[in-house]
Every structure is written in C-alpha cells, then in structure tokens.
Image: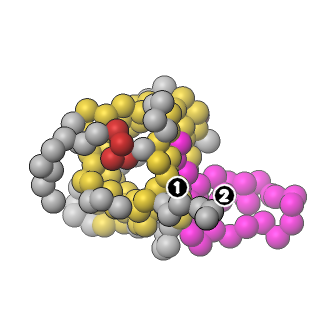
Amino acid sequence: DTQLMPLKPEDIIGAWNLVDTYRDDADGSRVKHQGPEPMGIIMYTADGHMSAITRWGTRDFPATTDATDADKARMFDTYLNYAGRWSLDGDTVTHHIEHAVNENFVGKDRKRVIDHQGDRMVLKGEGGDGTSTATIIWERAKPTGG
C-alpha cells in the first residue's frame, strides 16, 4: 500500500492487538520466532508514551506457583515486553525504550516502518539479531464497554 499522506500521531494512538509476527532471515527463510498463534498488545498514548507486550500463544506454564529455573527461563524466552516513549517521523515510528523485561533493550531505540491500513498496521524493521527483518502485524483493539 502506498501512503498518500504522511502518518499523523492520531493514526496510531490507541491500543492494537497482535495478529502475527515473523522474521525474514538473510537467507530468505521465514521464521515464526514467537511460535504459532502469538499474542500481544501495543499501546501508544497521545502524550508520547508506549508499551508493547508480545508472547508465544503456545506457552507452557509451570504446574505450580513455584516455578523452577527451567520454567523461568522458558517463560523469559517466550515473552517480550518494553515501554518508553515514541516519536513519529514520516512513516517511521521510533520506540525509545526505557523499561524492558530484557535489560539489554533499555536505552535503545527500535525503529519500525509503518504500513498503515486503517484498522490494521504492519510494522517492519531490523530483527533482534541485526541481520533479519522483523514484521509485526497489529489490528486496532475494539472499544470496550457500552
């Protein structure tokens, strides 16, 4: 889709539910890096804050509330979240990360090019490994209440 007009903050402000996410590697292979049926939400506020959470939809949870070290490692590996501020430049949103489950994200900027399709937006940008391309597909969350 081609953008006729530059994106405005109002185009992305609000809550969006994850539809799908995958990574295209340099060798041309596509990897569902958060497994089948990933879940998540991203929120952009009008005053410039953002928060993103994604997780594998097929996560195995510990059998009891006393998680083993292996349970904790698996849960960490199947969950991603970060929050901070956001800025928009043309069709590129930059997430300025201030908080994250993985401390290595803090202080970094994550740029994503937006293909805005009304109630759906596709974000593309550099994958976590620095060589792949990540694609994250979001759908505008429906209002709650009556």
Labels 2 and 1: the sequence-earlier one: 1
Residue 98 or 42: which is nearer the viewer? 42
Residue 129 on image: x %, y %: 37, 46
Magenta includes 116?
A: no
In the rendered image, the quadrant that contains the C terminus is bottom right
Taking the spot 53% from the left edge, 60% from the top edge, the residue there is 143
Disc 2 is placed on an element classified as: helix
Q: Nearer the viewer, mark 2 or mark 1?
A: 1
Amino acid type of the residue tagged 1 in the rendering? Ile
Determine the residue positioned at 56% across, 46% down: 81
Residue 132 visible in the current orientation: no
Q: Secondary structure at mark 1?
A: strand
Q: Residue 93, how many percent across, how many down? A: 33, 39
Please determine whether, in this image, residue 29 is positioned above or below residue 9: below
Boundaries of the magenta span: 51-79
Type of the residue with mark 2: Met
Residue placed under numbered mark 1 in the picture: 41
- The residue drawn where x is 27% and y is 66% is 29
Q: Which numbered tag is attached to residue 75?
A: 2
